[in-house]
Amino acid sequence: MSHAAVIRFPGSNCELETARVLRDSGISARIYNWNEMELLSDNRADAYVLPGGFSFQDRIRAGVIAARESIMDLISEEAVNGKPILGICNGAQVLLESGLVPGWKPGSIQGALAGNLAPGRSGYLSGWIYLRPAPEAIERCPWLCAADGEPIPVPFAHAEGRFAFRKEDMERVRSHIGLTYCAVDGSDPDGYPANPNGSAFDVAALMNVDGNVLAMMPHPERSFHLWQVPPDLRGPWGDMRRNSSLKGLGDQPGPGAVIFKSLAKYLGVE
């Protein structure tokens, strides 16, 4: 059976549900602590996930301390070897701070996840938004290969989620876009609130050069099941949730399942 490693740092708080949705997708999953590098080195996984939370209390800035832990050397090595690696929210911040995404210059930081820019608001924001997979990302990224291009509603919850880049790198960023924020119908978001943080090019998830590493700010593990979708959500997924009785919801897949089902497809899980 294909195996995924979920990396827990001090302050991670989404590792349990992340491991669970991997298992529900047919992939064996185990949580490894940040200081279990030797154990993980002896049990190399087929894929790696850095879950959400507040690693090391987000001191200095989100993700920066975790990015300098020794276990990230192993993750970087596995990224070079082509293993699928996903960072969700705080995990995405760790990937950017480690230089794995966008990865133009290995070992150096080429982008930032800056504070949210929302009219009349500052700091931590949460809610539900829609994402649109980039066509080239569906072709290149193991975390998006099962997507059909339709809008994907998922929750977001962050204070520093705005992808920002140097002016000279802006055009280069376009070929690394995995997911963008969009309106309910899949059209461009036209700013806040569809783009909840002011991210450049409406980026919600960014890939590395080879496409195997994805840094994603929203939380797909929190919409893996249909019962997790709010009944008042606009769009087809909200309609599906409203038209399903609580009894009938069961384990019906939700919109966020496509991220983990993509990995299962990529790994050949039946």
Image: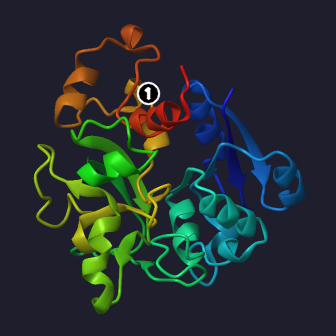
Q: Which quadrant is home to the N terminus?
A: top right
Residue under the point 46% across and 40% down:
222
Identify which amino acid the numbered label 1 is placed on. Answer: His
Q: Is 148 displayed left or right of 84 in the figure?
A: left
Q: Secondary structure at mark 1?
A: loop
In this view of the protein, can residue 259 be seen by the observer? yes
Is residue 148 shown above or below 179?
Answer: above
Count of numbered tags: 1
* Residue 192 or residue 205, whichever sits in front: 205
Residue under the point 32% across and 85% down:
169
Is residue 251 shown above or below 238?
Answer: above
Q: Position of residue 172 (x, y in %)?
A: 30, 78
Q: Position of residue 83 (x, y in %)?
A: 60, 51
Crowding near the residue tagged with mark 1, few <14, some 14–19, many ≥20 C-alpha atoms within 10 Å: some
* Residue 162 or residue 169, whichever sits in front: 169
Residue 202: quadrant of the picture: bottom left
Q: Which residue is mark 1?
A: 225
Residue 80: quadrant of the picture: bottom right
* Residue 150 or residue 53, whichever sits in front: 150
Residue under the point 39% across and 54% down:
156
Q: Is 58 displayed left or right of 44 in the figure?
A: left
